[in-house]
Amino acid sequence: MMLTDIRDFLRKHQGASLNEIARHFRAEPALVESMLDRWILKGRVVAERDLTGGGCCGKCGGHSHIRYRWVD
């Protein structure tokens, strides 16, 4: 998995949670998160609160309530 793979995935799916991206690439969420952070620093990805999700049970660590979206 490369940074461009994440870019292409986010463009195609118009946003995704950390867990969705990690599951797609069969990668550890921490690795995916560090790659997303690089895109965020470059201003190409934004992290947005997912307002469509349900209440927080605490099991996800809050990651599934953040959606990452590519910015052209």
Image: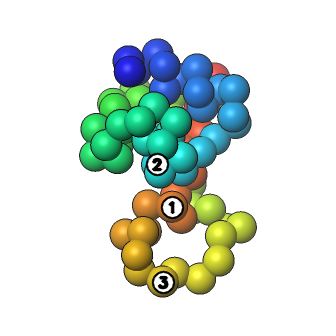
Number of the label disc, if any, that sits on residue 57: 3
Vertical placement of 45 versus 52: above or below? above
Of residues 47 and 31, the one drawn nearer to the viewer in this rendering: 31
Q: Amino acid at mark 2?
A: Leu
Element class at badge 2: helix
Query: Measuring 46% from the left and 48% from the top, which residue is drawn there?
Result: 18
Determine whether label 2 and label 1 are within 8 Å by CB.
yes
Q: Going by the image, does 62 lie left or right of 37?
A: right
Question: Which residue is labeled 2 in the image?
Answer: 18
State the separation of the CA atoms marked 2 and 1: 6 Å
Eyeballing the image, is 10 above or below 3? below
**Position of residue 53 measured from the top left corner of the image (x, y, whole percent):** 65, 70
**Which residue is denoted by mark 1 in the rendering?**
64
Task: Please tell me which of labels 2 and 1 falls first in the chain.
Answer: 2
Whole-number angstrom distance, CA of label 1 to CA of label 3: 11 Å
- Percent position of residue 38, x then y: 33, 30
Task: Give the quarter of the figure containing the C terminus.
Answer: top right
Kind of residue at disc 1: Ser
Relative image position of residue 64 (x, y in whole percent):
51, 61
- Between 20 and 72, the residue placed more toward the observer is 20
Q: CA distance from mark 3 to mark 2?
A: 17 Å
